[in-house]
Amino acid sequence: MADGTIKIDGRTVPFEKGDTVIKAAYKAGIDIPHYCWHPGLSAPANCRMCLVDVEPPPGRPKMQLDVLHWDAQTNDYVVGKKTKLIPACQQPCADGMSVLSDSSDEVSQARKTVQELLLLNHPVDCPICDQAGECDLQDYWLEHDRSKKRMMDEPVHKPKAEVFGETIVYDAERCIMCTRCIRVSKEVAKDPVLDMRQRGNRNEIFVAQGRTLDHEYSLMTEHVCPVGALTSNHFRFKARVWFLRSGRSVCQGCATGCNAYLDYDPRDNKPYRYRPRDNESVNGYWMCDSGMLSYPEAYEGRLETALVGGEDSDLADALEQAAEKLRGLESDGARVAIVLSAQHSCEDNLALAHVGKAFFGVKDLYVARRPDGEGDDILMHADKNSNSAGVRLVAEKLGLEPPRPMSALVEALGKDRYDYIVSLGAEVDCDASRLKEKLSKLKGFVALASHEGPLSKAAHIALPAASWAEAAGTYVNAKGHAQLADKVLVPRGAAHPAWQLVLALAKALGFTTDWKKRADLEGVLFPPALEEPSATPAPEAPATVEVQP
């Protein structure tokens, strides 16, 4: 509920208590140019790019400043007046306030002057820079300046390609001293390892003596950099941004489920980086380094072809042999176990659990997951699985007991509890060698996996599943937020979404399901739809697995 409204260039904009002019404009989708301001950081007001003209209340004159203007007729400076402009990042909103931004000539001149000052020691066009194509300095020069450089002197030279840590390289000549990186380290990471030294055009960012930029949010310093001063070792000179496309995703690194953009090149179907996607109820504006660097999992270590007895097989043949292994087990759930995956979507898990319960009469569920790891009180969760809560929700919706850990499955196999297992996922949090030994004694073991791992390697038949980036799916984070990740990449090799493989397997067994597409599965768990659709939604995957004869 808005606490009031202001006008920006005649447009009515709502605001909440505590909002500044730039924050209210940001929420309304109005761009007030800025460098130092960021919605998740404090506002130092040091770049002066966000200056605006705030109209005084009725009956009160505008505050004026004395300035010198160059008079071409007299060939001399003359005294004049100009309106005192206010940084929008520090001006609190007040109900009824009127602000002039793009419609003010004085504001436009101020922005042009700031741009010229920032470009004194910086080239106007710098195609060699890794930030080219998404550089605020370039964009604002085109929008607010477009004049040739007037300074012909040698620019000030500073350190270049300075290694700040394992992830970040610093180029001081490109730095505009917005101090965002300093504030990220201090305010987000709680590790004030960066600071600024020298004065004027000798300013530069430096790392504290005896330290490196090694906290878990070091890549956020590069993410917030509005120019090319800070670059990531992992993205530096790997791709040009104008060739990349973006898809809405959910980080798979832990149970926080940070919202992210997965940037990929459609020419080679390869992801090149993660970027945080703003969601104040989940991850704010940030991601940890582990999450930011998890994008290679979309293509590394993948299971791209079906395996039968450890040998490559045609998917159609593998499906038929999997059905042959499981045929005749209807309603014999006492000897069959289903293994769900805390790394796969709710739809994948629901499809397998539903067929397991309805067709085999399975009552025992287990869950394959990554081992727990390090967490913090910022974003990193100790549970390194993206959908642990979703797996529990699936079991609850089907009226089954919560899935038990894989260590319990190892114990049950040691007592010859099961003859057949159908599993989802690849990673386990138990002794992999011991598990493989127990699984080898089964009469039938069918695994659906997106990656190579203990389960896919031990299976009699392994079916290649699409990764989280190759199929739309829902993930429930540790706080219970159900989040939809779009299909971004084309599935590799013979991979298909796991729910499609389950549907194809059920069809081969003669079992008919009451769901035919992913939206049907989503509707069982989360009626109505989770959130607004993407601006460019991925096409819905076909309901059945099409296999070439």
Image (cartoon, grey):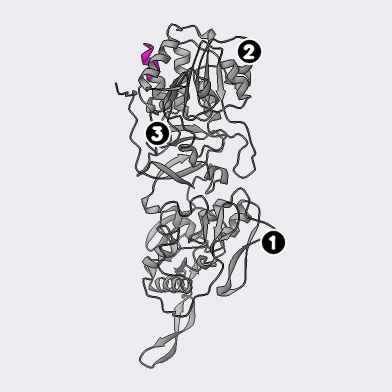
| Boundaries of the magenta span | 504-511
Residue 374 position in % (x across, y down): 65, 39
The stretch drawn in magenta includes residue 132: no
Residue depth check, mark 1 versus mark 3: number of the one nearer the observer: 3
Structural distance between the alpha carbons of marks 1 and 2: 56 Å
**Residue annotated with mark 1:** 209
Res 53 → quadrant: bottom left
**What kind of element bears circle 1?**
loop
Q: Is residue 387 above or below residue 434?
A: below
Name, please, the residue furthest toward the bottom: 74
Which of the pair 340/515 is nearer the observer?
340
Image quadrant of residue 306? top left
In the drawing, what numbered circle is on residue 414?
A: 2
Q: How busy is the neighbourhood of tag 1: few (under 14 within 10 Å), some, or many (20 plus)?
A: few
The residue singled out by tag 3 in the image is 492
Badge 3 element: loop
Q: Which image quadrant: the C terminus? A: top left
Name the chief secondary structure element in magenta: helix
Residue sitting at x 34%, y 32%: 540
Question: Considering only vertical position in the picture, is 481 above or below 48?
Answer: above
Query: 461 or 412, which is in the foreground?
Result: 461
* Drawn side of residue 517 relative to residue 353, left or right: left
Name which residue type carries label 3.
Arg
Residue placed farthest to the right in the image? 210
Q: What amino acid is labelled 2 in the image?
A: Gly
Q: Is residue 507 found inside the magenta-colored segment of the image?
A: yes
Mark closest to the chain's N terminus, 3 or 2: 2
Secondary structure beneath label 2: helix
